[in-house]
Amino acid sequence: MNFSLTPGPSPATAVAGEGSYFEELFLARIKNYKIKRGEVLNFSLTPGPSPATAVSGEGRRFNYKNIFSKKIMISQFVKGKVYVFIDAENLFYSQRNLGWRISYEKLMDYFKKECGEATRCFVYKGIDENNTGQKKFLDMLDINGYVLRTKVVKIIKNPMGKNKWKGNLDIELALEMTGLKDRYNTAVLISGDSDFAIVLDQLKQAGKNVIVMSTRGRVAKELLERAKYIDLRKLKDKIAQKKSGAAPSREHSRVSSHY
């Protein structure tokens, strides 16, 4: 269910509508009303547009965090054939926010189970040709059915004389998302990068269903406003590595094989 926040009695009115709840967008918007995380609000339910209007005020008490506690399955939102587009660089850093590592084997199994065997998953990743460990990672992706889109990273020295890796494939991902739109009905974007907002707009104008998967602190509000959103934290029991140790640290290279 979508919602909107407007000035209300004490202190806001939340109106239910079509769509799904977006936790990140909710948290961003309630800041305008100076509601703190974990704060308990009073509210009452009254008949509303579709299907109800929740008005803060007298009534039973609730903690807004609880409305997001229900497990979300992507199969609730997909329509027809599904293509998944994974921004590997963005996902790599999302794991630092998550605090656990994602198993690409389990991730593929999850999409096949939830979206159907015809689901295709594309991974976009910059590579270091001298990184032998990374080749094993790429081989694993290939064996598990991922379609790989790679580009050799460039090493650029910054003004301080330190090396900086440059291997962004955002343009390639965006072009393929739009270029293949006639082959799928639902696009799943695993990234939180706001640069993809215009791509989602184009897909929606073409009648496509769009879903974004990311996590708190890594997803832009521009994406939350345009697509159904699934937080990766809710899928931990299905896609996390069993014994993965700590999440990737700042010391890991942007072309590390440790995803």
Image: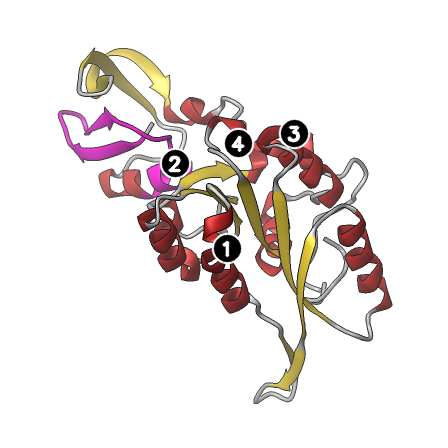
The residue closer to the viewer here, 76 or 24, is 76
Asked where in the image residue 43 lies, by quadrant, the reply is: top left
- Callout 2: helix, strand or loop? loop
94 above or below 160? Answer: above
Q: CA distance from mark 1 to mark 3?
A: 22 Å
Extreme front residue here? 182
Q: Residues within 10 Å of mark 3 (few under 14, many from 20)?
A: few
Report the magenta residues as a range: 2-28
Element marked by disc 3: helix
Label 4 sits on residue: 74
Q: Specify the color scheme.
A: secondary structure
CA gap, disc 2 to disc 3?
Answer: 24 Å
Instruction: Judge whether 93 appears above or below 117 on screen.
Output: below
Between 9 and 128, the one lying in front of the other is 128
Q: Which residue is mark 1?
A: 180
Near mark 2 (Cα within 10 A), the count class, few <14, some 14-19 or many ≥20, is many
In the rendered structure, find residue 113 and report the number of the disc placed on it.
3
Closest to the camera, between mark 4 and mark 2, is 4
x and y, in percent, of residue 243 in the image = 81, 38
Amino acid type, callout 2: Phe
* Mark identifier at residue 22: 2
> Mark 4 or mark 1: which comes first in sequence?
4
Look at label 1 and name its amino acid.
Answer: Leu
2 vs 3, front mark: 3
How far is the residue under mark 1 from the one under mark 2?
27 Å
Along the horizontal axis of the image, is 25 left or right of 172?
A: left
Q: Residue at x 52, y 60 (%)?
A: 176
